[in-house]
Image: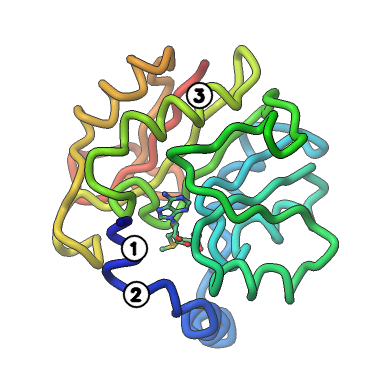
Amino acid sequence: MSRWRELTGESSGEDYAARFAALARSGKDVHGEARFCAALVPAGARVLDAGCGTGRVMIRLAELGYDCVGVDLDASMLAVARKQAPELPWFRVDLAEFEPDLLGIAADFDLVVAAGNVFPLLAAGTEATVAKRLAAALRPGGLLVAGFGLDEAHLPVPPGITLSEYDDHCAAAGLTLVDRFAGWDGDPYDGGGYAVSVHRR
Ligand SMILES: C[S@@+](CC[C@H](N)C(=O)[O-])C[C@H]1O[C@@H](n2cnc3c(N)ncnc32)[C@H](O)[C@@H]1O
């Protein structure tokens, strides 16, 4: 069972969306992830939002002109995504079993983004498999972008994956580390409790 499911019972879609809507109303920037991705690949590029949740990141990327697909396992999160953007493609799939071909999707994404602690919220022991599945969905030269917390202060669950474990999983999946940042604003990584990693296939 995913740590996300243990944490939320997979019934928190509306609450999650309401929390971000309140942040946006209070003037907080809730589009850092989309802006970060948009700086890496040009508009029109194919983007997979892996663990898309309510579509917070993907809907923004679609507004910016990206050709997006969203995948998540939590029906309550996807229900919000579908309500907010019924015209976009959302799939209820376990990332550990994700095979684009089975869904009629080409496995040639320019960028895969896993934002919002997706890796530490996977079922324990599936991280390497998920890295492999996501790498396989990329075109050669495509980018995997993942942002997640590394300590208790930056995670809603006990820390589950270290950066070196993540890099090892990516390397085993044929990916090379390109860059690492302290957050979605692009500040250089300084060894802190949150990292945004960019790997290339
Ligand atoms: C904190 S939410 C982040 C949602 C979205 N990426 C965002 O940044 O707003 C983490 C998401 O990871 C998803 N997730 C966790 N394990 C998963 C799995 N094995 N397959 C698909 N989605 C998964 C959860 O369902 C949840 O929607």
Q: Residue at x 54, y 37 (%)?
A: 98
Quadrant of the image occupied by residue 164: top left
Badge 3 crowding class, 10 Å Cα cut-off, few under 14, some 14 to 19, many 20 or more, is many
Question: What residue sits right under mark 1 in the picture?
Answer: 4
- Disc 1 residue: CB within 8 Å of ligand 1: yes
Q: Residues under labels 1 and 3: Cα distance? A: 22 Å
Residue situated in front as seen by the camera: 69 or 62? 69
- Disc 2 residue: CB within 8 Å of ligand 1: yes
Q: Tag on residue 8? A: 2
Q: Residues under labels 2 and 1: Cα distance? A: 6 Å
Question: What residue sits right under mark 3 in the picture?
Answer: 135
Residue 63, percent across and down? 79, 58
Q: Residue at x 37, y 39 (%)?
A: 181
Contact between marks 2 and 1 (CB within 8 A): the answer is: yes
- Earlier along the polypeptide chain: callout 3 or callout 2? 2
Q: Quadrant of the N terminus?
A: bottom left
Image side of residue 153 versus residue 172, left or right: left
Quadrant of the image occupied by residue 179: top left
* Amino acid at dot 3: Ala
Q: Quadrant of ligand 1?
A: bottom left
Residue 78, percent across and down? 61, 67
Q: Residue at x 34, y 74 (%)?
A: 8
Q: Residue at x 70, y 23 (%)?
A: 108
* Amino acid at dot 1: Trp
- Disc 3 residue: CB within 8 Å of ligand 1: no
